[in-house]
Amino acid sequence: MVRFRHSVCCALFLLCTFGFALAQEKLDPAVESRIDALIKQMTLQEKAGQISQYDGISPQTAELVKNGGIGSLFNVLGAENTNAAQKIAIEQSRLKIPLLFGFDVIHGYRTVFPVPIGSASSFDSEMIEKSERVAAKEASAAGIKWAFAPMLDVARDPRWGRMVEGAGEDPYLGAIVGAARVRGFQGTNLADSQSVLACIKHFVAYGAVEGGRDYNTVDISEQTLREVYLPSFHAAIKAGAATLMAAFQDLNGIPASANHHTLTDILRVEWGFKGMTVSDYNSVNELTIHAIAHDHAEAAQLALTAGVDMSMADGLYGRSIPQLVESGKIPISVVDEAVRRVLRAKFKAGLFDNPYTDTKRAQSDILSPENLATARKMAQESIVLVKNENGLLPLDKGVKTIALIGPLVDDKANQLGSWVANGRAEDAVTPHEGIKAKLPNATILVSRGVDLDLQGPHYGSGATGAAPAPSTATGVSGEAATGPMSIDDAVSTAKKADVVLLFLGEPSNYTGEASSRSTLDLPGDQQKLLEAVADTGKPVVVVLESGRPLNILWASDHVQAILQAWYPGSQAGNAIADLLFGDASPSARMPITWPRTVGQIPVYYGHKNTGRPTSPDRWHTGYQFESKEPLFPFGYGLTYTTFKYSNIHVDTPSIGPSGVLRVSADIANDGKRDGTEVVQLYVRDRVAPTSRPVRELKGFTRVTLAPGQHKKVEFSVNANDLGSYDPSMKWIVPDGTYDVWVAPNAIEGEKAEFQVTK
Ligand code: BGC
């Protein structure tokens, strides 16, 4: 069954990627001739307008729409509002070209899903696709036809706040997750009223900013660019991504929004991308601040000729392009090509036939029970169990007295995470609410203990609505007890309970854009709270909410169980309660390597072998007085049962460069409960012209087994996907011996080997 499912998945993946790749290349002649006709009619000013995007609707932008001065608006929400703006374009502008409405639909629209690094932890591309389908349905019901997502930036430095928006450190996982998100947003037909155009971002290597400081310089080799940062984009394009956003930062000296090498040589020429590109917010204008352009006109010229079709928010194309063409600095053909791509996206989106949104849809399509059920399941699958001493979890629902402690117990806004689109705090289920619903007969004692940080309560995250609950302790089984917010109060509350659940983390606005941190420590007095509560000797479960790995070294030694919940979204409290009390089982895995200390950063499993030390060692280069190991490896996560790996078998011990590697292993549930294991396939090319990572993920599959059950899991990988770039940047599949592991994470597993022959 697993074998069948996995082969089907592989076949489908190949079919989807290659099928859509062909569709990308084949243009519809009828649409192309309608575009030709429109371009012929457009004035130079209208062309410059068509490739300009503005933020929000105002009397000024409405006037521009009327004059054909805007091709796209973003941050206009609600079908009534988008329809009203669209009416101006359709009824009052000369050529009646519809507007394209964009928005940052990062992890849901109104129903908020786990933050992307959380959903990526599920290693479940079907659920991720389903979640983005819900996001597309809700966003499109609100008039949005273009999501500025998914973010495909590989991130290996947790100080970088935007790690939360991506799929973690690995190019292969990033590619699978990115393609799934694109399929979810776009569905099978972009013109479907419930589909939105995806916008893969940020092109490219934004995750490699020096020191993890947002917007900072990136200086990486062409090989690293191609092997680590580009694959997720290429996979998403093969999955049919309609649009792409250029990044802010400079890449090897050339800002991403003026980078001809990435935006044209690679994207257009090598990959044949026919979709539309857009700058990031004001990033064309910022070319003057990067100081590669003397003025705004030169900035517009650099961006457009590098390959940025539409400029976001700065209005620079509208203002500069007519003069640039008239003065001969930009050929009109370059402008026409950009206009063509924008119009093509609008045709694909069906906007010329259906420019308006049915206002009745919002009622049925947004925040529906089905959408919330999908969000709850996605959240259950996103939470990683990293420690569970003596099987403390799942807890018995018959527990008499339970203490819920910590600043996130009753905090609604922070359950949602950063960049929550139209998410509202009032929709979020807190851990307290979720547990209360699960345990109607228990005595639940609540003490917030400390604030989330030293600045006091956080309403951050951009979510509107209810503020975090006050710092009171409430017995919900009848008698209510209030107490002061203090560590003493938390300790005395803990002492009264059979088990303590400690909800710690970072405020969600500590993550996301412009939210890099120099430390990974728990903010405020949370470490003190943790230590004092653990000191009571009660069994303690830590539920950690964050958008990046935090420093939980002390916790990992001193508490019995830890769940890394990321920010689980609207259904946070329900999903957390489902896992804590065994109505769902943890199955998520780390999409990043979790450092022991901030000084280990960057630390990632796919590092290169070095010359020293000379003996084989997993984490070759290390620090004095510190372990070379991370706290948790990539791919790590526990379940409520145990799995045994055996009988790794390479069906194809020798393959040619165009062959297919087939590897299988037996996976047995040798524990006492049902469970889902994320079985991972890693490969290492032992000798190649360039030094290779010690392991590279090449496949994974989720396997659900009852106690005593076992299954043979089979993986197939095209030999071509085992290759690497040689020093001249040619893709090769080196011959020789390769190691292969079928593994529960990036440092364990059953090992075998195979040969690639010429
Ligand atoms: C972010 C993008 C986002 C854009 C529009 C920028 O600041 O980098 O990810 O899509 O704003 O809101």
Image (tube, rainbow, N blue to C red):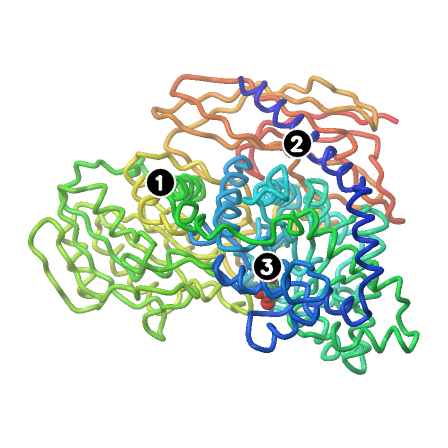
Report if the beta carbon of the residue with label 3 is closer than 8 angstroms to ligand 1: yes
Which amino acid type is shown beneath numbered disc 2?
Phe
- Label 3: few (<14), some (14–19) or many (≥20) C-alpha neighbours in 10 Å: many
Give the label, 1 or 3, closer to the camera: 3
Task: Looking at this view, name the residue that lies furthest to the right.
Answer: 328
Give the label, 2 or 1, closer to the camera: 2
Which amino acid type is shown beneath numbered disc 3?
Gly
| Mark closer to the chain start, 2 or 1 | 2
Q: Is residue 748 visible?
A: yes
What mark, if any, has residue 102 been given in the picture?
3
**Disc 3 versus disc 2: distance between alpha carbons?**
28 Å
Could you tell me which secondary element the residue under label 3 belongs to? strand
Out of 517 and 257, give the one closest to the viewer.
257
Q: Quadrant of ligand 1?
A: bottom right
Report if the beta carbon of the residue with label 1 is closer than 8 angstroms to ligand 1: no
Residue at 64 percent across and 51 percent down: it is 351
Give the label, 3 or 2, closer to the camera: 3
Q: Position of residue 383 (x, y in %)?
A: 42, 44
The answer to whether the residues at label 2 and label 1 have Cβ atoms under 8 Å apart is no
What mark, if any, has residue 13 been given in the picture?
2
Report if the beta carbon of the residue with label 2 is closer than 8 angstroms to ligand 1: no
Task: Looking at this view, name the residue that lies furthest to the left.
Answer: 479
Q: Is residue 212 visible?
A: no
Out of 598 and 135, give the one closest to the viewer.
135
Count of number-bearing discs: 3
**Disc 1 versus disc 3: distance between alpha carbons?**
43 Å
| Mark closer to the chain start, 1 or 3 | 3
Residue at 70 percent across and 49 percent down: it is 347
Out of 182 and 519, give the one closest to the viewer.
182
Q: Which residue is mark 1?
A: 388
